[in-house]
Image (cartoon, rainbow, N blue to C red):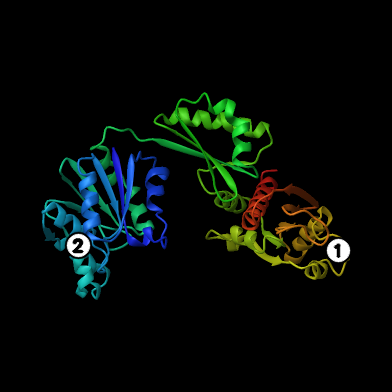
Amino acid sequence: MITWVAIGSEILSGRTVDQNLKQLALALGLPVSRGFIVSDNYDEIARTFSCVAGDPVVICSGGLGPTSDDITISAFSKWSCLGLEFKEELYARFNSLDENLSSLEGCKKQCYIPKGFNFIVNAKGTAPLIWGDFKLTRWFFLPGVPHEFRSFVESSEFLNLMVEKTSRKRVYQRDISVYFMKEAEVYDVVKDITQHFSDEVGFYPEKGYVDIVLRSEDEALIDNRVRILADRLTSEGIRFHIKEIPLELEVHNEIKRSGLTVSTVESFTGGALAQALMAYPGSSKYFKGGLVVYSVDAKKNLLGGKSVVNPVSEEVCEALAKQGRLFFKSDICVSTTGVAGPGKDEWENEEGLFFIAVAFNNDVRVWKRVIKTSRDLLIRQGVFAGLFGVLDCLKG
């Protein structure tokens, strides 16, 4: 059994979202049996420690910083009666980072750990990972800052220390993101397949897509099931992405590999597609620029004063992509136009209607979709459609 304890009043207040549990339980596939969120309060933390003591592995996140509200280690020391000891090695690390840090009282505080416990130096920050065995439990205390937490849980040293205290095997996970469909629609397409899977299958609506999540202790088995589901989705003409890396990163890698340049002309997506294409370092080598032509007049100006009878139409979307490619002198140009709502527009185009066009060489491909959803999610759908349009272009 692995037990999760997130310590921090900012989580309970809603100010901060607990990203670390997702990193631990989903990204690494570690089976977590139960979890707690605790405020920065000595009595509450002590009660939680009493509740989880005896579980094979307890992983605590947060409260290891230099300030007065960072009380996790002192609370554990008080509850366990182990006391604290000062670690010169941690103090020396502050000196190596910045001599001014070592003189600060809060930084000295981070050099104390429970007596008999061990530590691993933090390569991304100042708070170490602290671990040790007490009351039949292996305790881990990790920084709450997400990128610092992640650097520890991805280390083989942490995994080995954790696995040797639990008989549970690692659970492998694969995600298939399905786009432009609702959860019930996705399930209806694959239910005859997934109902025969003996291991865990979950369906999770995200912002603009639905994740099919497969979990198993058998990595080869889960890979085979991913292939089976991918074949079904492909045969149904459904857009999906096997989420080993984000969709935006796959597009980024494909564009870099192609050596081509890209530009955008956007209406209802308002620059969000350009932002997605610029999300990763090195995008300046291929992204030539983007225009937001939100009003009808802006569209007319880009099109050289041509009349725009209906701004949300296949003809206008195609013309915007062609003109944008010429304007930026790019190999590829993606355009978007649609009705984000609420309600119909003045041309009686229905809410949720949008077009995506991709101009490449002398060819333009246009996709039409109607998706009934909220305004912000429709914009995300438009961005995803644009990214898939670029992928289609690059992969022929």
Dots 2, 1 in contact, CB < 8 A: no
Q: Nearer the viewer, mark 2 or mark 1?
A: 1
Of residue 229 and residue 208, the one placed in the foreground of this image is: 208
Judge whether 1 appears above or below 375 on screen: above
Residue visible at 83% across and 66% down in the picture: 303
What residue is shown at x 27% (from left), y 66% (from top)?
A: 69
Q: Position of residue 31 (x, y in %)?
A: 35, 38
Q: Closest to the observer: 79 or 305? A: 79
Earlier sequence position, callout 2 versus callout 1: 2
Q: Secondary structure at mark 2?
A: helix
Residue 94 horizontal side relative to residue 288, left or right: left
**Quadrant of residue 110 within the rendered picture:** bottom left
The quadrant of the picture occupied by the C terminus is: top right
Q: Say which of 363 and 335 sits in front.
A: 335
**CA gap, disc 2 to disc 1?**
67 Å
**Mark 2 neighbour density, 10 Å: few (under 14) some (14–19) many (20 or more):** many
Provide residue 277's location: percent of width, then percent of height: 61, 58
Looking at the picture, which amino acid does disc 1 mark?
Answer: Val
Image quadrant assignment for residue 242: top right
Three-letter amino acid code at disc 2? Leu
Decide: few, some or many residues near mark 1? Use Cα within 10 Å; few <14, some 14-19, many ≥20. Answer: some
Mark 1, residue position: 308
Q: Is residue 256 visible?
A: yes
Where residue 129 sits: x, y (%)?
25, 54
Q: Which residue is mark 2?
A: 90
